[in-house]
């Protein structure tokens, strides 16, 4: 959505890691050991993977990082990467939502076992139940999308987020956005923020 609507390069470690896990690569197997237990992938590994993809060409046209950084350690690692690229960070946006809503959203996610495409039982259903629209592969529930694992992940994530939010608040980069509501509603709040700050590159919707 960022690339199509905002004209920004979109990078997400979650997407990268899911693709690697679907491929069964060495990186994917390494990441799987953490996510299957509801643990965060170590900061050093996340920063290493993202640094390799934050190329000068991607940074030149503007970029949006989705789900990264998630800890203060990752934020400091990102700062070092961007300093070497002479590309400062403009803002950090945090979507806040109740835990009950997050569990409901995440537990409805289904992933294609073959190609890694994502679906949702309520908001992004496949044309044929249980089958991927792209490759007809079987849709499965990831271990880290089971309710018990989700609650554990959220607990770990929120503990890590507290110092991260303080870090960006001290640097006057933090923007809190209400993450409750439909995709359209939340995206509208984000675009309002982007327009107000002069970062919007999309068309007039």
Image (tube, rainbow, N blue to C red):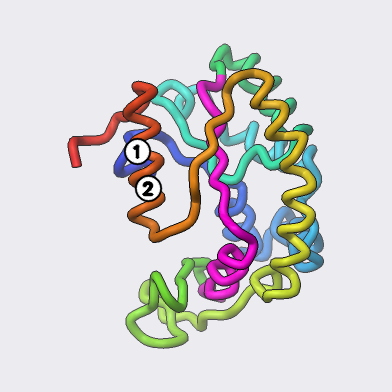
Q: Which mark is residue 64?
A: none
The residue that appears at 46% across and 29% down in the rendered structure is: 58
Helix, strand or loop at disc 2?
helix
Q: Position of residue 36 (x, y in %)?
A: 76, 68
Please report contact status of discs 1 and 2: CB closer than 8 Å, yes or no.
yes
Q: Residues within 10 Å of mark 2 (few under 14, many from 20)?
A: some
Image quadrant assignment for residue 106: bottom right
Furthest toward the bottom, the residue is 129
Question: Residue 96: within the magenta?
Answer: yes
State left or right for residue 204 relative to residue 117.
left
User: Over which residues does the magenta segment extend?
Assistant: 89-113
Question: Residue 18: within the magenta?
Answer: no
State left or right for residue 133 relative to residue 138.
left
Q: Residues within 10 Å of mark 1 (few under 14, many from 20)?
A: some
Alpha-carbon span between mark 1 and mark 2: 6 Å
Q: Which mark is residue 191?
A: 1
Image quadrant assignment for residue 73: top right
123, above or below 81, in the image:
below
The residue that appears at 79% across and 54% down in the rendered structure is: 156
Helix, strand or loop at disc 1?
helix
171, above or below 4, in the image:
above
Query: Label 2 belongs to which residue?
Result: 187
State left or right for residue 107 relative to residue 42.
left
Q: Work out whether residue 120 or residue 61 is closer to the camera in this orientation and state it.
A: 120
6, above or below 140, in the image:
above
Q: Work out whether residue 115 or residue 121 is closer to the camera in this orientation and state it.
A: 121
Quarter holding the C terminus is top left
Q: Position of residue 160 (x, y in %)?
A: 77, 44
Q: Work out whether residue 115 or residue 188 is closer to the camera in this orientation and state it.
A: 188
The residue that appears at 48% across and 25% down in the rendered structure is: 59
């Amino acid at each position: 959505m960022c690339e199509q609507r905002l004209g920004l390069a979109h990078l997400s470690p979650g997407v990268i890691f899911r693709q690697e896990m679907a491929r069964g690569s060495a990186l994917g197997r390494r990441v799987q050991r953490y996510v299957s237990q509801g643990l965060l992938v170590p900061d050093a590994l996340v920063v290493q993977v993202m640094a390799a993809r934050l190329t000068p060409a991607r940074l030149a046209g503007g970029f949006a990082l989705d789900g990264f950084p998630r800890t203060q350690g990752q934020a400091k690692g990102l700062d070092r990467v961007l300093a070497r690229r002479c590309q400062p960070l403009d803002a950090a946006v945090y979507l806040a939502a109740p835990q009950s809503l997050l569990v409901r959203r995440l537990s409805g996610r289904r992933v294609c076992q073959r190609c890694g495409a994502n679906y949702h039982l309520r908001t992004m259903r496949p044309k044929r139940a249980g089958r991927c629209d792209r490759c007809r592969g079987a849709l499965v529930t990831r271990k880290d999308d089971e309710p018990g694992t989700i609650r554990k992940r959220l607990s770990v994530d929120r503990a890590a987020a507290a110092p991260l939010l303080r870090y960006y608040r001290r640097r006057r980069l933090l923007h809190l956005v209400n993450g409750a509501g439909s995709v359209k509603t939340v995206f509208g709040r984000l675009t309002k923020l982007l327009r107000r700050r002069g970062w919007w590159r999309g068309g007039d919707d």
